[in-house]
Image (tube, rainbow, N blue to C red):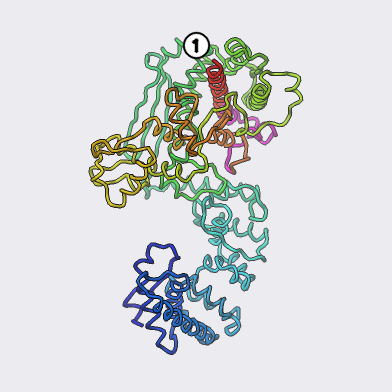
Amino acid sequence: MKDPAQRDRLKFYGPHDVANAVLVDEAVALIRAQSGKQAIASMNDALEVYNALEFERLGVLPRTLTQEERDTLATASRVLRGQIAAFFSKLDSLSIDEHLNGLDREYTLDVLLLIGRYKVAKNVGGQALFDALVGAGIPLWAMLEDKPFVEAHDRRLRDALLADARCAELLVKSHLIKNSSDAYALPKSLTTADSQQILQSYIDSESPHLNYVEAIANAQDKLEHGITPKIRLAAQRRKAGLVRALFEDKTHTSMSTGYAVGIDLEQREPVLDRVERKDTRTLRQRTFGGLHLKSSMESLHVLANFRDMVGYSEGRGLLAFPSFRSQIGTLEGLRVSGKDAYPRGGAFAHRDCLTILGTEAYYDFLQREGVEVEDVIAWYFREYLPEVFDAAGFEYAPSTASSTYLERCRHICAEMESVTKQFTLYCEDGELDRELLQMTSAPRPWGNIPSLVDQKHLIRAESRDCDAALHLLFNDQSRITYVNKELRARTFVELVLTHEVSYTDLIHYQVEPVDWLIAEGLMSLDDGVICFSSLPMIRVLQDVHKYGAGPFGHYGFEESAAVSLVERGWLEFGSTLLTSAEASYFNFFLNKSEFSDGHDLRNRYLHGTNADPRDESAHRTSYLQLLRLMVSLVLKIEDDFFLHRRSQS
């Protein structure tokens, strides 16, 4: 073989890797050349031959080979496997360091595999072998990926994990990181106390990575993983210090965005937004028109202002502020986050800031005008529902004007549960029996609250075709979003809407997916120009992609397009009050049933684990968050009654 410094060594990356088309000829040539030699001289040579043999073993061979050539190659491969076995059998404590010196890093996992397969430890000795691997720079993560190796070196690996605080990152990756591909076989001798010690040492270390500390802070308590309330609290405090230090470090340039919401008593427009930029800081300001607010003081108008002006709804009955997976950018998705953390990005943070500040501004305005938002909610259930929808029996007891914010928080949590129980009974029985309500105790999960409407939402069905269409049409990573410098857009739908794209403009690898979209009836050609076959169908799919659900009852004349997608098995109907994204949003703020980093407001206030009772500012913040959820629940119930009445007419 040639000097390895003169060429890149052969590596097999798997039977389906695209590089195989280029590397397979090199693998065949290597097998033929080496089979005529008597022995393998070096570790890198042995590992390169092993990788070449993987092509032959898995049948990844040139199609041009005849059967006779394949048979000859199989015979040569058997010879080479014998050479590899002979090489590893000769390794001993005197030669192991020399052979591992200069190991090609591409072969890190391969060398561990073959050392175990050929039982090298018997000749070298377990400790000597482990020391040689460490001396050769074999990383700990690679050792932990090899389960037999972990079993053979259990205590040694435990000691190595305890010796270096940075090893906590391996524990975090293995147990706590969302979508992590790292699944390590940790030593069985590693105790829960060991795991806690490793995590605590990492938290206390000089420069832990902020993202890993945050993952620990947001994790669910799990003793076997070393996660306890004490560890989480230490991580939360360390995270706060790291963030503070990051912003105080003047050697780094950081972009920051601020938000401000207020009321302009002379402004006629309901809402005005403006953006101010100075250096690296952006300030987003929103003002509500005082003249508009004073002209809409009736209770129903107050709810409508929360919906439309403060921005609770995107329209058509869908809440605007949950975190939607479609709005988490590609780079944001690469960020390290806890396995059970609420998935969110910049778009969610933007809506969350504006709506909570808007809630506070409007709440204070209404109080100054002598209106309590909870009194409006009570009016809605006691008077509006019976009068407009003939739905009698609903009750909401508002907080008293003299209540502290701590008392208001506890009260609104209880009333929110009461409202959901009342609505659930009404959906199931068509009426509200107060005596039956008193016998109902356990709250229903937010995602299981029923709807009065059988076909409330459209959601994805188990359909690969639907998944493929949504990716091609709306994903910014779709391969048909960029044709050339002039014909490009964030998504393919945007590309077709904003440009005239001719079929002949497409790059060769874009023809097949576009042909498929045409065959599925989503796209068509108009005199050679790509266009939409059915815009209503595209709009329905866009809702499902963007919000995770389509508001079927609001489609009007476009309902037929939605039904056609159900009939082809792409979508299906859901009948719950909240969409999946909305239910997750409620869970994020009210409990920790779904997300480890949830605010847990309901449990904190009903179980007495809330902030210091004397910290009125903290309880006011919590109350505004709870009020936002309560008003949102009212808006969802209002939409449900509206759709139900329309479906009955």
Quadrant (top left, top right, bottom left, bottom right) of the C terminus: top right
- Residue at 36 percent across and 83 percent down: it is 1
Position of 123 with respect to 483 (left or right) is: right
466 or 329, nearer to the observer: 466
285 or 8, nearer to the observer: 8
139 or 487, nearer to the observer: 487
- Residue 374 part of the magenta-drawn span: no
Q: Position of residue 630 (x, y in %)?
A: 58, 25
Position of 537 with respect to 124 (left or right) is: left
- Helix, strand or loop at mark 1: loop
Q: Position of residue 538 (x, y in %)?
A: 39, 34
Q: Amino acid at mark 1?
A: Met
Circle 1 residue = 297
Q: Is residue 62 visible?
A: yes
Task: State the extent of the magenta-drawn residues as a range.
Answer: 596-623
Question: Up-down: is 243 above or below 637?
Answer: below
Q: Quadrant of residue 309?
A: top left
Q: Position of residue 311 (x, y in %)?
A: 46, 25
Q: Quadrant of residue 528?
A: top left
- Residue at 49 percent across and 35 percent down: it is 567
- Residue 608 part of the magenta-drawn span: yes
571 or 95, nearer to the observer: 571
Tag count:
1
Q: Position of residue 208 (x, y in %)?
A: 51, 55
Position of 409 with respect to 256 (left or right) is: right
Considering every residue shown, the one lying at the far bottom of the view is 38
- Residue at 49 percent across and 49 percent down: it is 242
Q: Residues within 10 Å of mark 1 (few under 14, many from 20)?
A: some
Q: Is residue 101 visible?
A: no
